[in-house]
Image (cartoon, rainbow, N blue to C red):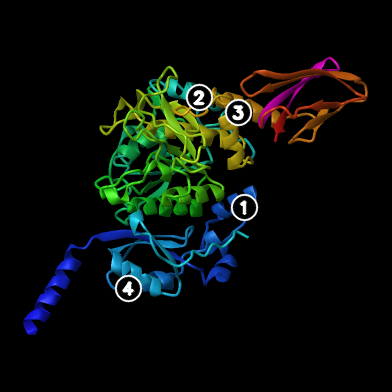
Amino acid sequence: MKIKLLLFFLLFSLVKLFAQVEDAWVYFGDKPSETVFVSAPLTMLTQRALDRRTRLNIPIDFKDIPVETSYITQVQNAVGISVKAKSKWLNAVHVQGLQSDINNLLNLSFVAQIEYANKSLNTSGKEVIHKKNTQKKKSLDFKTDFNYGNASNQIQMLKGDVLHQNNFTGEGIQIAVIDAGFPNVDNYYAFKRIRDNNQILGGYDFVNRNDNFYTGHYHGMAVLSTIAGYIDNEFIGTAPDAKFYLFISEDYLNETPLEESLWVEAAERADSLGVDVINTSLGYTTFDNPNYNYSYNDMDGQTTFISRGAEIAFSRGMIVVNATGNEGSSSWKYISAPADAPSVLSIGAVDALGVIANFSSYGPTSDGRIKPDVCAQGANVYIINSSGIIATSNGTSFASPIITGVIACLWQAFPNKTNTEIIQLVKESSHLYTNPTAQEGYGIPNFETVYKVLDIDKNTTTEFLLFPNPAKNNINFKFPIDVENIGVIIYNLLGKKVFQKNIQKNNPTADVSYLVKGIYMVQIEGNNSIKTLKLLKN
């Protein structure tokens, strides 16, 4: 009998020893301290973050409330469970443990659902509880007639130099770069300017859980260089006067689902600090454990943990810019997560002539949405390399931050615009907006066009008026007293004439029902003058 018992326990021990440790997300059903935190928002968000919410009319809601600490403690204390990350936005913790031990967490009353990274294990669980979400221009201390040197083409392709010439270089905008590491950003000459000007606000290594973010893989450093690098007359990034948080979420030695959770943690930290724009040159489709791999069907913007987190990041008022991936010539070929998220601005790569790079990943998303959204130079693009010198490299990893920097400059120019408005204008300015493709999306944006549209809107006179605006079917014109008729021409953002008509004062209406949704420029000629107004067609 004793021998049988000994064999039983030995067998049981061997089963436990060789059982697969699984990754899973454990979702909670509520946040008991919600009322307390809502009444004290500065315990969750900085004043800068709250000011952004006020400016963009985004209320504090359930997602902003921290995960209940006692819930995390109870999960951590459960047998065989290790808590690796947490997310207030998704009200969940990332755990590792044996399947049997993880399943035992369902016995905790506050656990709503368990989602395994290995989708074949997702066969049971409680029902998830979903809770509804009830400037003055400043003169700069530097010259703006930059000699971009090697970086000229990648900036001028987007007309980012036009923003710089108008003194918009990212000043006052905060950018979070979430990547694999930033070694030597504290040493290399290319980053001396942002160090000397105190433009690095801080950072964190979420992989190793410490404050040393000047470590890890140089990929993040190279990405940062395309935005913030500065070697006079040789190399200048697209937003040289923005300020930066540097977050490490990518474990470059391993590829695991935990990295998704760490990215969401980093995005939540960025939000709480009041960051305006997030750049991520990362993407996830396959892992070291093939049981965790995603399929193309999962690239729908709502399946992966990271894409759901990215969508929430956008709902907090930030712009999230993400590389689409470099799988265009591989068997996979498609975009990765979180580039599939609907509100993420996903970036493909072109060469110096604007021709799509063969490695740039294809869309659309599995549910049929246009991705990538837009493109920038990512083939033979100039960066600061691991040795701290100017060199060329390839990848959507660099196309993404190049656009991130120009967006920062644009938002500096028009700080009262929402993230939704900025992104839509960027898409509509792109050269393929009316005829997007699977690999280029809407194409290469023209930030000069966007700048002029918004500048006209800001400086519009009331001598001529059109209404309603936004319009759906018809627009009406209001005339000055001494004008009886006007000539009206409507252009789309690509400069194509889509409407022309003489409008009489006694019948001041024009039918625009046939125009596709978007931004248009309305040129009005009358009273020996020409005025240009902006029209938003719904």
Name the mark on residue 450: 3
Q: Are marks 4 and 2 in contact (CB under 8 Å)?
A: no
Q: Position of residue 19 (x, y in %)?
A: 21, 63
Q: Main secondary structure of the magenta part?
A: strand
Q: Residues within 10 Å of mark 1 (few under 14, many from 20)?
A: some
The answer to whether residue 269 is magenta is no
Q: Residues within 10 Å of mark 3 (few under 14, many from 20)?
A: many
Q: Secondary structure at mark 1?
A: loop
* Residue denoted by label 2: 158
Foreground: disc 4 or disc 3 = 4
The answer to whether residue 529 is magenta is yes
Q: Secondary structure at mark 2?
A: loop
Q: Report the span colored magenta.
A: 518-533
Q: Position of residue 175 (x, y in %)?
A: 47, 42
Q: Secondary structure at mark 4?
A: loop
* Residue 223: quarter of image: top left
Residue 210 vs residue 358, the one in the foreground: 358
Alpha carbon distance from label 3 to label 1 = 24 Å
Q: Position of residue 441 (x, y in %)?
A: 49, 29
Three-letter amino acid code at the position of disc 2: Leu
- Quarter of the figure that contains the C terminus: top right
Residue 87 vs residue 123, the one in the foreground: 123
Three-letter amino acid code at the position of disc 1: Ile
* Residue denoted by label 4: 78
Q: Which residue: 43% across, 24% down?
A: 154
Alpha carbon distance from label 4 to label 3 = 54 Å
Relative to 38, residue 205 above or below: above
Alpha carbon distance from label 4 to label 2 = 53 Å
